[in-house]
Amino acid sequence: MKKLLLLLTLGLLNLHADDGYRLWLRYEPVTDSALRDIYRAALSTVHFQSPVAAVNPTIDAATHELLWGLRELLGIDMQLQGTDNAATALIHADGYRLRFDREHGVTISASTDLGLLYGSFALLRHVQLGLPLEGLDVVSAPKVERRLLNHWDDLNRHVERGYAGFSLWEWFYLPEIRTPRYRDYARACASIGLNGTVLTNVNADAQILTPDYLTKVAALAAEFRPYGVRVYLTARFSAPIEIGGLKTADPLDPAVAAWWQTKVAEIYRAIPDFGGFLVKANSEGQPGPQDYKRTHADGANMLADAVAQYNGIVMWRAFVYSPDNDDDRVKQAVSEFGPLDGKFRQNVIVQIKNGPLDFMPREPFSPLFGAMPRTRLAAELQITQEYLGQSSQLAYLAPLWKEVLDADTFAHGPGSTVAHVIDGTLRHQSPSVIAGVANVGTDRNWTGHLLAQANWYAFGRLAWDHTLTSEQIVDEWTHLTFGSDATTVATINKLLLGSRETVVNYSMPLGLTHIMAEGHHYGPGPWVDKLARADWTAVYYHKADESGIGFNRTAAGSNALAQYAPEWQQLWGNPETCPENLLLWFHHVPWDHKMKSGRTLWDELCHRYQQGVDEVRSMQRDWASLQGRIDDERFTAVAQRFARQELDARDWRDACLLYFAQFAKRPFPAGVEPAAHPLDTYQSIKLRNMPGHR
Ligand code: GCW
């Protein structure tokens, strides 16, 4: 009887195969008949209220989305009624108001066409979440003006640090052949409020700026335009030489500036709403103004002047660390950019990675967010999981991003959080920018790991509104992606919310960073000690020896700590008050140091690695409990990845603990499983043909 009941319940769930292509825009029929009837009655007519009079491609896109979505969800053909209402001009930027009242039904008001599109997606989300219409009245506007994906896509369709197939952009076939996937990409972006995309890798190729390629870029821009997704390109600083025939790319040479101006004019003729340039200069071998003894500001300003008359912007990356500077790598961005504060044009935004090192599973926020109060600053987050298991492991990244966005820089007194630095509210700075390095590719489900779709979703939602919590976002995403079965939703929410900390535990706990093996950023290699640069090795970062482990960044060490506000210096500067999750980032700590758990540091380290493995196993079990509750296709795809993650987690634990034990000279404490192989087995592993790696 019990079994029969279970089968009956499961029969009500939607279990047909799903390959994940539809992302969070599945529009599965509402099955609760009472709710469906209420929705049907209320949504047979939807009102668009806006001063935007004429029908245009964006309004068409909104209309089409609503018609189609409500037909799928409710089986009705919605009627749309437009009313012109200037009062909606009060709704900020591309925001919207979504409200219901008994007399008029649902009204979406906005002062722009894009606002209507965002409002339409919000309505569809509301219905998919099964939320009540009674009392619905929300006003929502983006907190950051330019919400961009950064694609690290090469022109041959290789994606640097991309783990979900090839680049979506079919350069060879453009402009004539345009896959419907372009539209679907733009729809997905718009549905979460993203309004721009940098199409090309920051390790840039000047070819993209040649006339042939610009025609191709224009074709993509045309595909995305109805959805409000503007295109941007990366500018290779040496382009005037490489494709322009000049002898120099010196930003202060008038011929160079003139070349860029002509090039920019050509770009805007082809793409009138072109957004601007993203530049990686004098970083990891990329050309830049310093090649001519000029500063980053000289380089950025020259490009900024070229795009200014078109309202274009230049996003100038601060990810720099010089081969000639042997100061602690994490200090170098502040030393180089700090003195340039106030020297950049109004349309230059200095784009800063969330942490001072490089997208590690955990690092403190970049001190540069607090060091340039007179400069527009953008945050660059990484959606693709370069250092967090790529697309074989689960790491829901909203908690990581929130940690950074909510961190207080104290730059303008308490409350100067990174979020407020970048959204421009502290000093009324515009334009404001947030960027996320994309995790999408040609894989059928877009992101390789199906659950990594949540990271694309979360980035968009946070870019729109950084006050949303990780919990709110995950709950939305899970409902939209897996339906409303309460057990399924609760299980997946829990899996996702804990997953980033799990990766931290089994790979780089307690503030350890950058201990990957040589040649890739996937598996463990704490022994790596000889590479072209010291600050690419693992030993540079963990500094394990017989006395302890960790990087001393206090005044007695590299003093990177001094780049932070006194409040942070006080907290982080003392190993007793420093949060343990950053302990080894700031301190070299003796193996016998007493931790909050009462364990010694060595025992705690062992315990964290083991805990990471245990947590993966528990995620695996939780996922297994969903069999039959979700379709087999998605169930199996994710189950396979959890199996791989369990294996990888054990490798991380065993390799790191065996290696560190050589210095700690202590046994594994009780509860830590013995390693499967001797250390040299792990040291001899050479992973080859890694995706996303040249
Ligand atoms: O994280 C490192 C990556 C490089 C990347 C670089 C950067 C695009 O390993 O692949 O290059 O950062 O952000 O510029």
Image (cartoon, grey):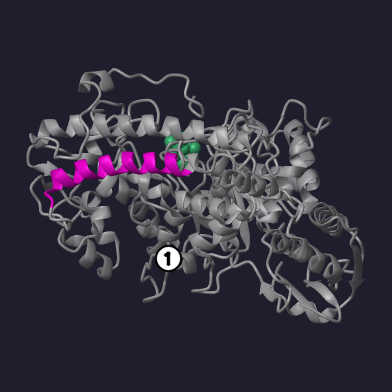
Looking at the image, residue 7 sits to the left or right of residue 490; the answer is right
Instruction: Residue under label 1, please give it.
Output: 406
Q: Say if 155 sits above or below 572 in the image.
A: above
Left or right: where does residue 53 sit relative to residue 365? right
Ligand 1 closer than 8 Å to label 1 CB = no
Residue 80 is drawn in which quadrant?
A: bottom right
Residue 481 appears in the picture as rendered: yes
Q: Secondary structure at mark 1?
A: loop
Residue drawn at the location 41% of the way across and 51% of the way down: 498
Give how far across and how far down residue 233 sits, in percent.
Answer: 64, 43
Horizontal arrangement in the rendering, residue 371 relative to residue 316 (left or right): left
In the visual, does 180 lie left or right of 264? right
In the rendered structure, does residue 174 fall within the stretch colored magenta?
A: no
Q: Which residues are magenta?
A: 599-622
For image coordinates 62% across by 59% down, the residue present is: 146
Task: Locate ligand 1 by image quadrant.
Answer: top left
Residue 288 visible in the displayed image: no
Label count reads 1
**Circle 1: residue type:** Asp
Tell whether position 609 is magenta. yes
The one nearer the camera, 108 or 9, is 9
Residue at coordinates 80% horizontally, 45% vertically from top-left? 222
Q: Position of residue 335 (x, y in %)?
A: 33, 53
Prevalent SS, magenta region = helix
Q: Position of residue 166 (x, y in %)?
A: 62, 29
- The vertical placement of 191 against 105, above or below, is above
Q: Residue 441 appears at what percent x and percent y?
A: 62, 35
Q: Residue at x 70, y 55 (%)?
A: 191
